Image (cartoon, rainbow, N blue to C red):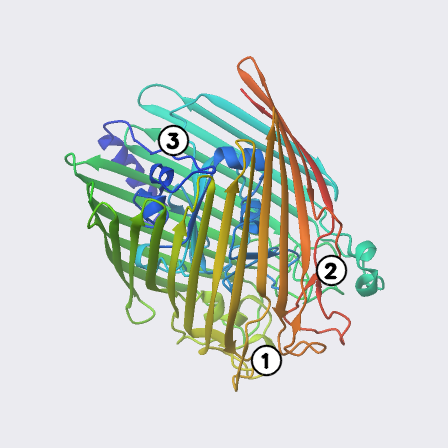
Amino acid sequence: MNIKSFFWLFILIQTVHAESKNYEPEAEFMDVSLEELADVNITSITKMAMPLNKSPVTAYVISQDEISRKGYRFLTDILKNTPEFYVTNLAQTEKAVNEIYIRGIFANNKITVLVDGNKIKAPTGEPSTFYNALPLIGVKQVEISLGSSSSVYGADAMLATINLVTNTGSHLDTVKIKATGGTADTAEVQVNAEKQINDDINVSLTGSFHHSVQENLRKNYPEIYGNAVVDLDLTEQNSNLYFKANYQKLVFSYFRTQTKNNNALSFTPKFYSGVPIWEPTNQTANVSYKSDLNPFWQAKSSLSYESTELSKASSYRTGLAPNQDMTWFGEALRFSETLAYLKGDINWLSGIEVSAMNSLPRNQYDVPTLPKYHLRYQNYAVYTQLNYDVTETFALNGSLRMDADSRYSPVFNPRFGFSWQAMTELRFFGSIGTSYLAPAPSSMYETWNMPSDPAYGRPNLNLRPEKTMTTELGFNVEPFKGNSFKMSGFFTDGKDLIRLTNIGNLGFWDNIATSQTYGFQIVERQTFTRDLSADVSYTLTQGQQDAEKLNSMVNITNSPEHMIKSNLLYAWDKFTFRFTGRWFDDIGTHESNKIYQGDQMHGTAIFDSNIHYVQPIQSAEFSVDLGVNNLLDTKYYVVPLYDNFGGSLSAQPQETRRVYLTVGLTY
């Protein structure tokens, strides 16, 4: 029996056992006090509902109301305004339109992304490219927790866990439609429909489509691109589909997103001809069944099928020539069984997870020196965790997970944290944990997807997982009503990081690099009146990492040392006005940059704005958002990884002013 047949058989078996209605807790988060945070639950930290005011790590919950009032459309809009996240556009890497850095570390492949608790990332460890393709129209809340989570989620939960919690369909029978148009030929539509069919069945469906031509580099950056060989085509086109159905305690969901992008400007700006360099499709199908064994014991069975495929139309590593039948396909079948004991002050959860992975490069080149690798491997995991309220004000959290991969030795990842409500207005929290990132097949067999060219690195079948330890200690305080202040310090230690030993003809990937980053963040939130609120955050990030030539340590690169983010929100009648500012400075350059050679570059300040209007119309609701990104049309740059063009491309251009108008209808 193959993987897909086994998956559908499992659905049929579980359908027979469905008994009663599934329950999902609700949570809202606006400008609330520390006491009110007890009513805001977050599940991304421990897989169990935890009050936000007992979190042992820095965590954020963004509610549906906040998403609407601020005019956020995609997940990237939230991450750009989240402290400790640094997001750049028109990425330097070949596999991303947006580069995301967390606490000074490139994080696209080090974040676990979930929809309703189910992983939607590439199952075999490739970097994620869909952060700007995840719509928020059907999302009830977005949960973001920082720090190591491999003790709960396994591989790639190294720096953050993001969970998009969608509406269940069991509360409202609604249809939402949003259409957006804007500069750069932006055309976009998002649709969400929820329906409770009867007491046992409810369904929801979310879909989106986005098209944009991105940046006009010849016009906006003529000093770099004015003499380009071809007119650079940076068209971006994304589509997303998410379906969820509940039948009593049985839940089925299907997620699919497709991204088509031209990017990696610092690598190949001279040669773009309209061919998408990276066009992957991610799919996840999941079925789960919950059972209440008694008032305190619960069990959950889950089976998921995940796949990621790179279209053969992609020009990635093909000399920018499409239709060469050089693609990549990865899939995984995961089965998990969890048992939970939930009794107020003691919440315990344990489980097992079995995964079968399959990675296949579909390379039709008849090149003797290019083996046709086909990698199959398995992962077996056992994990346990305990949330224990020692007293009414002091809570402990501990978890441990063991992953045994058929490619390397078992990996153990513990995490320990605490939360202490020292007084009504003051809370201390802290955590320490380890995490890992399994080596992706594309790193083990870097030459598998291209004609034989040793300049891109040779295979290394002995790669081990990358490992990271994260530590955080901080406090929340509410000095007076309407004001909250948070400060926390962090330290991240990375070992066995995978790097090329040499860029020359004998280069290969190996576990040879280390890194250490450290710093602190301050977040101040002030509610002036019921209609006016503001927040500001400052993040300091410093550290070192191995130099490319592996003979010295250098400062962290491509991420700012100083970063300030601020939001001002004002509500008047049916209008909400948002004004956002982001400032970053002292961005470390790569030692291979021919101009800066490891020096720090100055950043800039970027401002965004949005006007949200909502008008109830009988049983419906009409809304309009007028938004502007980069309000002052600032021409600014980030640091390129390399400077391959004789010094002409010393810095990476970023998006200039964008204006968009969104019209929405809910009924």
Assign a secondary structure to mark 2: loop
Decide if residue 456 is on the left or right side of residue 459: right
Residue that sits furthest to the right in the current view:
227
Q: Residue at x 72, y 41 (%)?
A: 659
Q: Amino acid at mark 1?
A: Ile
Decide if residue 354 is on the left or right side of residue 568: left
Image location of residue 105, percent across then percent down:
51, 65
Residue that sits furthest to the front in the current view:
480
How far apart marks 2 and 1 lie (CA) works out to: 23 Å
Assign a secondary structure to mark 3: strand
Which mark is first along the chain, 1 or 3?
3
Which residue has dot 2 on it? 272
Which mark is first along the chain, 1 or 2?
2
Q: Amino acid at mark 3?
A: Ala
Q: Which residue is nearer to you in this view: 117 or 250?
A: 117
Which residue has dot 3 on it? 245
Q: Which residue is nearer to you in this view: 277 or 346?
A: 346
Assign a secondary structure to mark 1: loop
Image location of residue 362, percent across then percent down:
52, 60
Which residue has dot 1 on it? 503
Q: Amino acid at mark 2?
A: Tyr
Q: Residues within 10 Å of mark 1 (few under 14, many from 20)?
A: some
